[in-house]
Amino acid sequence: MSSPILVTGATGFIGREVVRGLLMSGRPVLALARGRDGQTAEQRVAEAVGVIPDGRLLSVIEGDLTGRGNCLGEAERVDLRETVETVIHCAGDTTLFPDAMESFRAGHIDGPVKMLQWLGSGRLRRWAHLSTAYVCGRRAGTMFEGDGDLGQNFHNPYEQVKLESEVAIRRIGSRLGIDVRVFRPSIVVGAAPKTSGGNPSNLFFHFLRMVAALPDLTNSSEVTLRIEAAPRARFNIVPVEYVAAALVTLAEHSDGARGTFHLVVSDAPTQEAMLAMIAERFGVRGLSLVDCRRARIKNPSPLERLVARMLSTYRDYLEQDVHFDDAGAHRLLDRCGVPPPSLSSQAVGRLIDLAFEGRPAIQRFPLDLRSYA
Ligand SMILES: NC(=O)c1ccc[n+]([C@@H]2O[C@H](COP(=O)([O-])OP(=O)(O)OC[C@H]3O[C@@H](n4cnc5c(N)ncnc54)[C@H](OP(=O)(O)O)[C@@H]3O)[C@@H](O)[C@H]2O)c1
């Protein structure tokens, strides 16, 4: 059997998909995870990953990257040093404004750096590092995969620490002769757990359910709803299946060595086009985006205030006009037979279906919107 790939963050939104993908392709996986709420790491990973083709391919080791909780013992480290050739590092706290910066930095920077250092003294050859396209911070325009620290300002500590983490891991990797590959998804959507990383996707689905509910709850298909955003800017979401497939495919591919890859939808629709697709699907008229860089919404209705509050956490990303160039990822994944993700109206239709999967009726939006319309 080939040496197992060590995956961190296997209980998370992206990590669980990566583990599934590796197991489906017959690769043994060693998942590093935390125990919590009376459950062992093994139980939590099993629950997150679900049914797998061959249970013998998956083993779990308990550990916390901050070094605070359950740390790996020396015997476990020796064992990992002697077996692991590739790490896919998916663990990370996606809180945009963390309360405790010290442990946040430890989880994103100090912990992974220490792990790279001790694994790097053994058999380790590659470290696939999950970052974010938003290491670009507040920059606007086209971002290239080779862009890094250009002195940009950030919307939040999360973006800044993710960039610092990339830089630190690359520095240690090059010192130790480890091939570090950086993967930068935009905002990941799909069937997401209720984790911090699943929040943007769950909010997007929540928004879809709200739009679907509007005609019934207001007894009209014409609902005035103005949302502050950047109408002509791209709506930068990417399906989780593509992100996981890209990680599984490129983590060890020889042509991916030392690369940085944007994992995005190359021709993502504008926010305006996305809203039009959603409105058309549900037969709702009257939804519009107001370019907040030119004007603010005057006299918002209660419904408009409710929606603004609902979207407030990700408001910065609705206002930013940014395009992520993914030429490198696109070229390589195309050669490997991984189809590029799409946000065509058909693909958006599939995402919408997913938002309603398992729900008895689309009208089940948990709010009485009549009082807001
Ligand atoms: N979701 C997105 O839209 C998105 C977009 C771009 C980039 N990313 C990046 O992708 C990575 C994964 O995000 P996600 O969406 O999968 O987040 P998630 O669903 O919140 O999962 C985070 C995972 O990291 C683990 N983790 C966090 N801190 C840890 C620590 N100190 N020690 C061990 N494990 C720890 C969590 O374990 P527990 O279950 O024990 O908490 C969980 O398995 C992050 O680095 C994030 O920055 C995410």
Image (cartoon, rainbow, N blue to C red):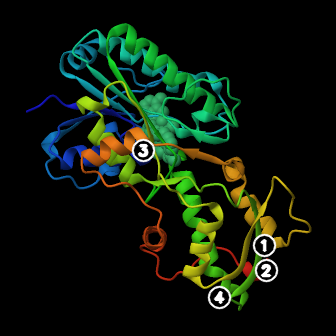
Using the numbered discs, state the Cα–Cα distance from disc 1 to disc 2 in whole angstroms.
5 Å
Mark 3 belongs to which amino acid? Answer: Gly
Q: Which residue is mark 3?
A: 12
Q: Which residue is mark 4?
A: 216
Whether residue 193 appears in this view of the structure is: no
Task: Residue 267 in the image: state x and y as whole percent.
Answer: 50, 56
Cβ–Cβ below 8 Å for labels 2 and 4?
no
Q: Secondary structure at mark 1?
A: helix
Using the numbered discs, state the Cα–Cα distance from disc 3 to disc 2 in whole angstroms.
37 Å
Task: Residue 3 in the image: state x and y as whole percent.
Answer: 15, 28
Furthest-bottom residue in view?
219
Q: Which residue is mark 2?
A: 373
Mark 1 belongs to which amino acid? Answer: Leu
Marks 2 and 4, the one that precedes in the sequence: 4
Quadrant in which the C terminus appears: bottom right
Cβ–Cβ below 8 Å for labels 1 and 2?
yes
At a point 37% along the width and 17% down the height, the residue shown is 116
Residue placed most toward the observer, 295 or 109: 295
Using the numbered discs, state the Cα–Cα distance from disc 4 to disc 3 in whole angstroms.
35 Å
Residue 26 vs residue 246: left or right?
left
Q: Secondary structure at mark 4?
A: helix
Mark 4 belongs to which amino acid? Answer: Asp
Mark 2 belongs to which amino acid? Answer: Ala
Residue placed most toward the observer, 5 or 140: 140
Q: Secondary structure at mark 2?
A: loop
Q: Which residue is mark 1?
A: 303
Task: Residue 4 in the image: state x and y as whole percent.
Answer: 19, 31
Marks 4 and 3, the one that precedes in the sequence: 3
